Image: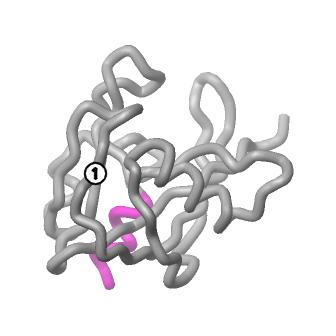
Amino acid sequence: MNAIKVVCGIIYKDSRVLICRRKVEKSLGGYWEFPGGKVEDFETNEDSLKRELLEELGLDVAIDYHFMDNTHQYDTGTIQLISFKCSTGQSEIKLVDHDRIEWVPTSTLLNWKLAPADIPIAKALMKT
């Protein structure tokens, strides 16, 4: 079975990074993640990330560069999580698929209940 391509944004503000908690009724409900979503067949990874962040958070970002990928096997299937460092001048965020957001220092990322696919990305961020 092929991995589902999923993109996520590592978005900084004042040396803190944005994490979002998935709504309880969603898959992986209650877990924190770097925001993003599934790449559609017709999209580039970058276009998909911009669309997902706009749909889920009302957030318009500039994609600075690709950070890293992580392939993770969940019970429901395999995902390839593709992360990008992003920036935004926007401060207002709307919640659609999430019930909370936090801006956290990268040094504390592993103190949060992160989705398993996001943990290797968090670990890599903590080393940079």
Which quadrant of the rendered structure holds the N terminus? top right
Q: Quadrant of residue 74?
A: top right
Q: Is residue 67 above or below residue 82?
A: below
Q: Position of residue 75 (x, y in %)?
A: 59, 24
What residue type is disc 1 on? Answer: Ile
Q: Which residues are magenta?
A: 120-128
Q: Residue at horizontal 15%, vertical 68%?
A: 105
Q: Is residue 83 left or right of residue 12?
A: right
User: Does residue 122 belong to the magenta stretch?
Assistant: yes
Q: Secondary structure at mark 1?
A: loop
Q: Position of residue 118 (x, y in %)?
A: 43, 52
Q: Residue at horizontal 61%, vertical 38%?
A: 73
Which quadrant of the rendered structure holds the C terminus? bottom left
Between residue 62 and residue 6, name the one nearer to us. 62
Q: Residue at horizontal 31%, vertical 80%?
A: 127
Q: Residue at horizontal 43%, vertical 60%?
A: 120
Q: Is residue 29 left or right of residue 100?
A: right
Mark 1: few, some, or many residues within 10 Å (few <14, many ≥20)? Answer: some
Q: Is residue 85 above or below residue 72?
A: below
Between residue 48 and residue 123, name the one nearer to us. 48
Q: Position of residue 34 (x, y in %)?
A: 39, 54
Pointer 1: what residue? 93
User: Does residue 40 belong to the magenta stretch?
Assistant: no
Between residue 116 and residue 99, name the one nearer to us. 99
